[in-house]
Image (cartoon, rainbow, N blue to C red):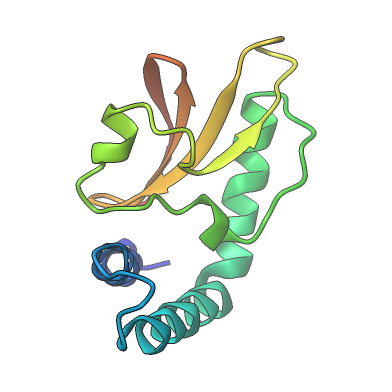
Amino acid sequence: MNADTLNKDLIAILEKKSELNKLDYNDARYDDMEEQLHDMEDDFNETYGDYLEDVLEDVHGKIKSDADILLPTAYIASSLDGKELEEGEESEGVWVESDKFPGVEMRLVLVANPPRVLLILSDQERVLWTAE
């Protein structure tokens, strides 16, 4: 897997999400931009799905989580700058439970620069995987 290409494609999705988030639902461009984002996500899952699902399986194993592994795009952050992560935004990534951290609310998030999977625990984040 080429980490640079993965990062480029991940950044493109994050930039499109950012553009879409700046639009009002009533904006005439909203539906077209949302469709473009969905097409990009479909292409991302087609290109990187098998690879990232293996990565996510390993990540789930590291934290001893038996939660279902979703499509890789479900884990993608909402923005490139990670502002939502810093602000503790609860909509980022995918909620998981872990036998390693019983009773702790946590999320797995796929971010860029470099592509990596973060484990977000209330006030901290841990890198569980980085693309090479």
In this view of the protein, which residue sits in the foreground, 125 or 95? 95
Give percent across and percent down for residue 71: 63, 61
| Picture layout, residue 102 above or below residue 68 | above
Image height of 114 relative to 98, above or below = below
Dividing the picture into quarters, in which one does residue 12 lie? bottom left
User: In this image, 43 relative to 26: left or right?
Assistant: right
Q: How far from the left and from the top, in percent, is residue 57? A: 67, 45
At 71% from the left and 49% from the top, the residue drawn is 69
Name, please, the residue furthest toward the front.
Answer: 26
Indicate the quadrant containing the N terminus: top left, top right, bottom left or bottom right.
bottom left
**Residue 83 on image: x %, y %:** 23, 39
Q: Is residue 66 left or right of residue 53?
A: right
Is 122 on the left-hand or right-hand side of 50?
left
Which residue is located at x 66 percent, y 32 percent?
96
Q: Measured from the top left, where is residue 119 in percent x and y?
A: 48, 29
Residue drawn at (57%, 63%) of the image: 51
Q: Is residue 36 above or below residue 41?
A: below
Q: How many marks?
A: 0
Residues 25 and 128: in front is: 25
Q: With 15 as the anchor, is 99 left or right in this view?
A: right
Q: Residue at x 68, y 13 (%)?
A: 100
Quadrant in the picture for residue 18: bottom left
**Is residue 121 depicted above or below 2 in this figure?**
above
Q: Which of the pair 86/117 is nearer the observer?
A: 86
| Residue nearer the viewer, 25 or 119 | 25
